[in-house]
Amino acid sequence: MPATFLSLPAELRNEIYIYLLVRKEPIDPWNGDHELDLNLLSTNTAILHEARSLLYGHNCFDLTWEPGRIPECIDTIGFINASHLQCIPIEFPRLRDLEDEVSLEDVSLHILEKIQSRCTNLRKLITAPESTNTMENRLVSFDSPSICARALALIAACFRAISSLQEIVVEVYEEGLSSDIRKKMESHGWILKVVEPVEVEEWDVDRSWDDFEDDEHLYDDNDDDDYDIDSDSDSWRRAAD
């Protein structure tokens, strides 16, 4: 019988998947310019099931471009694909306006709860520097070591609720506003990583997640679990188990 791709040793197939589907730099899922050869996923169901764990597990998906839509993104890729994710950059959680107690904004809570329930094998969480800087400004403005300590303890507890997490990297700008705040961050076991500010180029988003609901290319009408990225339409497609 002639040799086929699936007759190759699994180790060799994995090397091919990694070459075509894995990138060193974080991937923005809202931008189709990711240079991934996603046509491979449409070959057949067996290849899709083999390759998606590498696509989602070996890439770092940057979810900071539209932070409020992170839960939507996680729901869209489906439970199984989300369970393969091991590294996610997000915005630093935000605090509510202070009243009687320190608490997080509903959006931040929803994001962390969604990550906790869906990203069950997440190993590394990265907070974006601009959002970390915003939080540092907020904590400094309180001018209260007690409030600062309670706020960071609350955020640390939310991070710990993601039981699979092994590493929390807090990206910061070199000139911080308070060394005391950064020491408190490190006391929770977070790794502070100094990064340089970058200029963000403006680009037009010519599609929305609402468009994806009308995608007619369904593999299985009865499967609501998994999706894969389609390189031609830059959308997420449902894929069968």
Image (cartoon, rainbow, N blue to C red):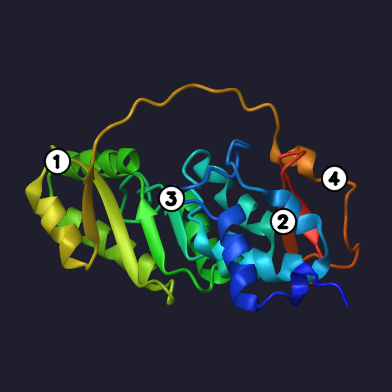
Crowding at label 3, few (<14), some or many (≥20) Cα neighbours within 10 Å?
Answer: many
Q: SS class of the residue under badge 2?
A: strand
Q: CA distance from mark 1 to mark 4?
A: 46 Å
Q: Position of residue 198 (x, y in %)?
A: 32, 30
Callout in the foreground (1, 4): 4
Q: Is residue 26 visible?
A: yes
- Measuring 83% from the left and 64% from the top, which residue is drawn there? 44
* First-in-chain label (1 vs 4): 1
**Disc 1 target residue:** 176
Q: Quadrant of the C terminus?
A: bottom right
| Closer-to-camera residue (116/125) | 125
Disc 2/disc 4 C-alpha distance (Å): 12 Å
The residue beneath circle 3 is 90
Residue drawn at (70%, 35%) of the image: 208
User: Considering depth in this image, is 185 or 172 the residue closer to the camera?
Assistant: 172
- Tag 4: Cα neighbours inside 10 Å, few (<14), some, or many (≥20)? few
- Give the amino acid at mark 3: Ile
Task: Compute the Cα span from label 4 to label 3.
Answer: 27 Å
Tell us which disc is closer to us: 4 or 3: 4
Where is residue 52? Give x, y as percent: 66, 64
Q: Secondary structure at mark 3?
A: strand
